[in-house]
Image: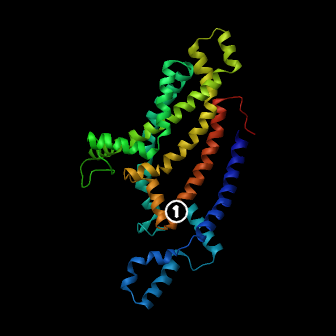
Amino acid sequence: MLKYVLKRLLYIVVVFLIASVLIFALYKSVPGDPARLMLEGNKQNMRPEEYEVAYQAAREKLGLDKSLPVQYITWLFNTIRGDFGYSLTYKMPVKQMIGVPMKNTILLNVTSLIPVFAITIPLGIATAVRRGSKFDNTVQVVTIVGYSLPFFVIALLFIFLFAVTLPIFPISGVQTPGLSGSPSRMFVDKMYHMALPLIVMVFTSLGGLTRYVRATMIDALRRDYIRTARAKGLTEKVVIYSHAFRNALIPFITIMTGWFISIFSGSVVIERTFLWNGMGKVIIDALNQQDFAVSLTMVMFYLILALVGNLLMDLSYVLADPRVKLT
């Protein structure tokens, strides 16, 4: 196991270096000059010669006056030691700028995971065990409707229902403007604003995950070892939860890797729809406004997250099924 982990960590380092070269080259090929974008708001107040001096100073500050290999090495070294550069859009260091959106995204996604898995796993198991029953058919109809509707349609329906027809929750925002008070009051207000996007995230996730758990459980219940376990006289609860569900976890763990990444990446659609200040909104704004420091930082962060997530996924396979051997 230790040998495998060390080998995978070396693999992560190699892939990270190769991907960093490709990503840096890709961003450098995108049209646009960060130095000119940095001075865009002050251009009208400068004479041409003043603007040229400021432009050269901006290029030097951003390191654009150096050759591409030197720029890449400088950027990679700064990234590794935690200096992610300066955001041209927010006029502050990237490390300082992404703190609040990252916390909002993690809070929203982690909070949604609890009800999603608390509902989908038992419901998927129940429908698989009762396959073909009225209960199973009813759940299948409801989940396929929720699975088929586009995300933004469901969001608009819930906004119309719970914010317009029944004005229970606010339509958008993270907190009430101008609100101040104790930390507990601020937290309750944030949870109140988070309620509607949280409900939408949970509802849209139920259909796909419930059907996926059901499919993996049905496949596991058909295996020979399940018939053998039942022939030995084991109770149905032991057969389902100790034998079938543990083996059904193997494909389910793969889905979990995607959820692990989404905890930090955020949902672009839901954050744009509800004006939730999270990482999805930050990434889109950075790409639209050519904020290269923010874009590069987030792409590299998600690259590391994907590599680490795949390693954790492989290690989880061993915990779920002792027959899986890592070499």
What is the count of numbered marks?
1
Residue 181 x %, y %? 24, 49
Q: Residue at x 56, y 77 (%)?
A: 64
Q: Give the side of residue 281 with respect to residue 12, left or right.
A: left
* The C terminus - image quarter: top right
Instruction: Determine if residue 206 is in view.
Output: no
* The N terminus - image quarter: top right
- The single residue placed furthest to the right in the displayed view is 327
The answer to which image quadrant residue 311 occupies is top right
The answer to which image quadrant residue 165 occupies is top left
Which residue is disc 1 drawn over?
Answer: 295
Q: Give the side of residue 119 with respect to residue 131, left or right.
A: left
Residue 294 x %, y %? 49, 63
Q: Residue at x 40, y 49 (%)?
A: 104
Of 129 and 141, the residue lying toward us: 141
Q: Name above or below for residue 73 compared with residue 122.
A: below
Amino acid carrying label 1: it is: Ser
Q: Residues within 10 Å of mark 1 (few under 14, many from 20)?
A: many
Q: Name above or below for residue 18 compared with residue 146.
A: below
Q: Name above or below for residue 216 compared with residue 14.
A: above
Residue 156 x %, y %? 37, 45
- The single residue placed furthest to the top in the displayed view is 233
Instruction: Determine if residue 72 is in view.
Output: yes
Residue 47 x %, y %? 40, 90
Q: Residue at x 56, y 27 (%)?
A: 214
SS of the residue under disc 1: helix
Colour scheme in use: rainbow
Of 162 and 32, the residue lying toward us: 162
Q: Name above or below for residue 141 compared with residue 240.
A: below
